[in-house]
Image (cartoon, coloured by chain):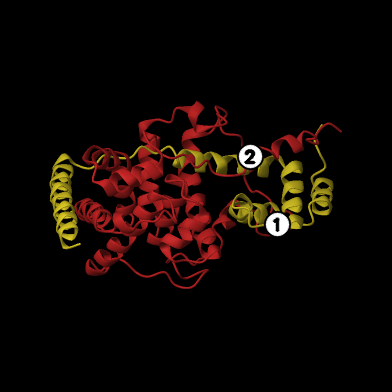
Chain colours: A red, B yellow
Amino acid sequence: MSFFVWSWPLNLHVALGVPNVQPSMPLDEADLVQALQRGDEQVFAAAMDIYSGSLLRLAMSFVPSRAVAEEVVQETWMGVLEGIGRFEGRSSFKTWLFRILTNRAKTRGTRERRYEPFGLAGSGSDGDDGPSLEDALFVTEGSGKGHWADPPQGWEADTPERALLSKECLTAIEQAIDGLPENQRQVITLRDVEGVSAEEVCNILSISETNQRVLLHRARTKVRRVLDPYVRGGNT
Amino acid sequence: MAMDNNFKQRLMGYMAGNFSCQNIAELITDYLEGSFTLGQRLRFQMHIGLCMACRNYLRQMKYTVATLHQLPSEPIPEHIKTALMERFRTWKHEQESQDSSSDTSL
């Protein structure tokens, strides 16, 4: 009975976590902070180059337009100058930046009538309280209830590094993120795009761990669906 | 050899502590985020080990996360950088004059 996949223990070791890669820095973070506190102009310019893209992306998840997002990024760097003297390294520098940005963006978002505070954990807090997202993928009645209606096939490459995703595909993913409810967009941007730890995401957005996971799961499920047609194997 | 579906379902239900494929799909993020108890984790892994479709789905979700981590970011416009550098120099100048005035007062 060779249909059993006895190799399963190997599969269980496929990386379980999310890689958490920091941007390439000429210095370590403590050096960076010290240099900023000393007023090193070159380091300030380098820090802007390294982090502004991430800040802009996060800002876009809060405010309605690119122009406003750029202003929020600008305000964030001014906030850095005001606060760097008091930065004690209790969080990473990047997390600290994201927190400053989030505070500024929320203020701005309220002004722009877009930001709505997180509600309680669970359904209804993100404008996405329908039945489980997975319902459409499964048999809902009869003896096969709870089984895949259309069992997922393997994707063509094991990792996106090997797949060399097309520009079109990356644009589709960006658009999918853009179309998510606001809270889901903020969580997936921080957790998956920027690689911030779950604990820090909760901290930055002031949400519970459970709420973070619910929002993240919904967001990931939708992005997976968008990615699917681009990376399906040749058998479709 | 085609497998008797009914038998497979019953066997999987028994082996996997009755996690259905839908449960697995709904719980994937909880699993990946490490929020399971040991018992839940084992049941989840047991199902994954036995079910090719769920194993594919788990891989797809990991792939999705890895793809998200690779999205390129856009740089901020030059004029904002220029404005911020200007701001930085003003800030530095203020810091230095503050420092020197507090030095003299001591």
The picture places residue B79, in percent across and down from the top left corner, at: 13, 43
* Residue A188 badge: none
Q: Nearer the viewer, residue B104 or B89?
A: B104
Question: Residue drawn 44% across and 72% down?
Answer: A119
Same chain for marks 1 and 2?
Answer: no
Question: Residue drawn 67% across and 41% down?
Answer: B55
Subunit bearing disc 2: B
**What amino acid is at disc 1?**
Lys
Q: Is residue A36 left or right of residue A208?
A: left
The picture places residue A151, in percent across and down from the top left corner, at: 64, 43
In the displayed orientation, state which residue is furthest to the bottom. A120
The residue singled out by tag 2 in the image is: B56
* Foreground label between 1 and 2: 2
Dot 2 falls on a residue whose secondary structure is: helix
Subunit bearing disc 1: A
Q: Is residue A144 left or right of residue A42?
A: right
Residue A135 seen in the current view? yes
In the displayed orientation, state which residue is furthest to the right. A1
10 Å crowding of disc 2: few (<14), some (14-19), many (20+): some
The residue singled out by tag 1 in the image is: A145
**What amino acid is at disc 2?**
Asn
Image quadrant occupied by the C terminus of chain B: bottom left
